[in-house]
Amino acid sequence: MIDPVPSVAFLRAGAVAFCLLSSVSGSALAQGIPSATLSELSVEGAAAGSLTVPSVAAQREAVNATVGAVAFVDATAFENRYANTLRDVLKDTPGVFVQERYGQELRLSVRGSGISRGFHLRGLELLQDGIPLNLADGSGDFYQVDPLGLRSVEVYKGGNALTFGATTLGGAINVVTPTAYTAFAPNVLRIDGGSFGTIRENFQVSRISGPVDVLINGTLTNSEGYRAHEAQRTQNFNANIGYRIAPGIETRFYIGVYLTDQKLPGTLSLFNALANPTLANPSALTGNQSRKVETERIANRTSFVLDVGKLDIDTWAIHKSLYHPIFQAIDQDGWTYGIAPRWAGSFDIGGYRNDTILGLRAFAGQNSALQFVNVAGQRGVQTLNALQSASNLEAYGENRFWFLPDVALMTGAKALSANRTYSNKGGLAASPNVQFADTTYEGINPKIGLLWQPLPGIQVFGDIARSRDVPDFSDLVQQNTLRTTFVPLQAQRAWTYEAGTRGRIDRLAWDVTLYRSELRDELINFSSGIGAAINIPAATFNAPRTVHQGVEAAFSLDLARDLTGIGDTLVVSQVWTHNDFRFVADPVFGNNRIAGIPQDVLRTVLAYAHPSGFHVAPSVDWVPAGAFADHANTLQVPGYALFNIEAGFDFRNGVSLFVDARNLMDARYVSDISVVTNAASVVGGPVAFYPGTGRSVFGGMRASF
């Protein structure tokens, strides 16, 4: 059980924050500012934004100016529904495959990034307010992303993330938090909960006083979880304070504290995943497997309006402490820090418009990596004493030249140098050997494309981009039956070709992209039959040649307007992600499919909204055929269909009530897989499956004032 008492303390903290910010406004009032000024500033600011964080409309415009596949999610789409993880935020975004494993642990993949990796994140850069969340080696997870602390989400698929300097296969996802200028309201209080003993409290307060603006947001979540040994408790705190130093100069500090205590239920056999999905893996119970993460983050963006364009200078530091008893008790503590100047501006060349982005990123980090024998979740004999260091230097640029009023040529490139240094100090009974490794990855990733905008609301694009994924320490440092060792993997490289269109004509909106990525040395994970039996983590190898190709499509049609004659609407939307990921003439796997992600993922939503504030949206999540569990393609999990319904009422006084019922038919299905090489060779079948969550109902109330 999770002690609910901290919830009271959390709400008290929210009350204290509210009082503090009220005192800020009170101070302003004492200086003679009329009482209505604060509200007016908050409302006007929501439209105007500020220098460091533009308005939501300007954010959307910047995303849609990208020559390539992108997506933009306004938090209005999920503010009044149950949103606990990034799946709840991104499930309507084509091309983004996101599935829950347990708690807030997800598989998040774009275009097959990290396709067969059974934990955390690879091949995709997470940013918050344009500033990296990933650690210096490129690894990342999801615990510090709080859906209730977001104002928008920007998805840059593949090479289109060059605008941030990211050139991984998957691209980048930038979660944007609100400021006092862009917040929905000066004060927001929310409580929701439901199945599996879930309860969440959230508060947000913001104020503007002269050149200063402040926003504080906090969320506390307690849940017992669908499965045994899945209880979680998370505490997320985000704050930012902005200051207009002078006309055209603004600085903003971001502070975040993220605490996660998550029990791990582990994987099951395919039989148990479908027949007994609430079970925990026995080794998860005997080892009391869990993940305790404490992360603190501080960042700053200072923006300068120049004669031409704007200069942003970002700096950040992240401290992460991890205690993670699994196959062994992993105990890590490290820092990541960086600086990234970025200039963007528009100017004329010979009478033609030209848009340019230039940037540098320098970031590094060091991580103390200790391991111990796991004794029922406690540290036993020490087995590893290592130091992991990563440093990165990057320079990038992107240019859009409008050689016709409605056609732009885009060119760009990124140069990178990434160093990974590993020092196993040895001297332990379980790991007597010393090992030192120092590897540097270098390269240039170019990009070229065309954008045609025949009408203001319609775009057609095509581009070619090169990506390069540098392996992180979870890839490079591997465990075998004898010791932990550094494996000098190659960087994963790819050329990606894409073509697509997005736009709206009257009642029809669309966003469709076709892409093909030709990869060399793809980083592929697998658990061997023997390794799975003795609880050794998945190994990583470079596959010589692979291909990722697919379709990312979303359509929306206004079926009816003014059904009752007073402005109500009925809209149907369809999201389809087609994944065709294969080995190419591989010496072991031939032209088999790469295991881990299903070929087709579809989502259909029928949404009705009434101007009185009532809204209801039944939906179907459909996977016609499940993913392969092994690269040998001997075992494929079943497909499934989930029926869901969301409904709510938004009152005119700022109060909203909502209910979210999921998997109404209580379907049994596999949500994710820890991939193996050959399932047929594993006696009794692999224990590699995460069962999907059964029938659940959540509801809540949100008050904005």
Image (tube, rainbow, N blue to C red):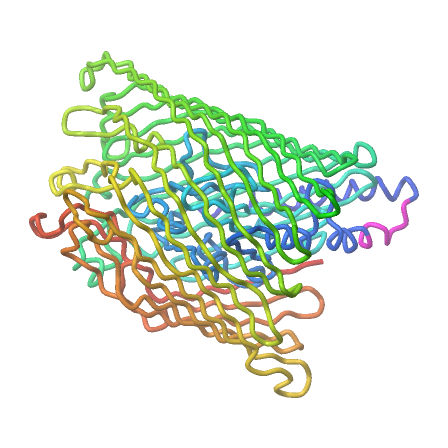
Quadrant holding the C terminus: bottom right
Q: Which residues are magenta?
A: 33-40
Residue at point 41% right, 25% down?
A: 333
Residue at point 77% right, 55% down?
A: 43
Depth check: give the residue in front, 260 or 274.
274
Quadrant hosting residue 452 = bottom right
Percent of width and height locating residue 292: 39, 36
Q: Is residue 14 left or right of residue 118?
A: right
Percent of width and height locating residue 352: 71, 48
Depth check: give the residue in front, 554 or 199.
554
Quadrant hosting residue 114 = top left
Q: Is residue 510 left or right of residue 561?
A: left
Depth check: give the residue in front, 691 or 585.
585
Percent of width and height locating residue 655: 65, 65
Task: Confirm whether the magenta stretch covers residue 34.
Answer: yes
Q: Is residue 258 left or right of residue 117?
A: right
Percent of width and height locating residue 569: 60, 79
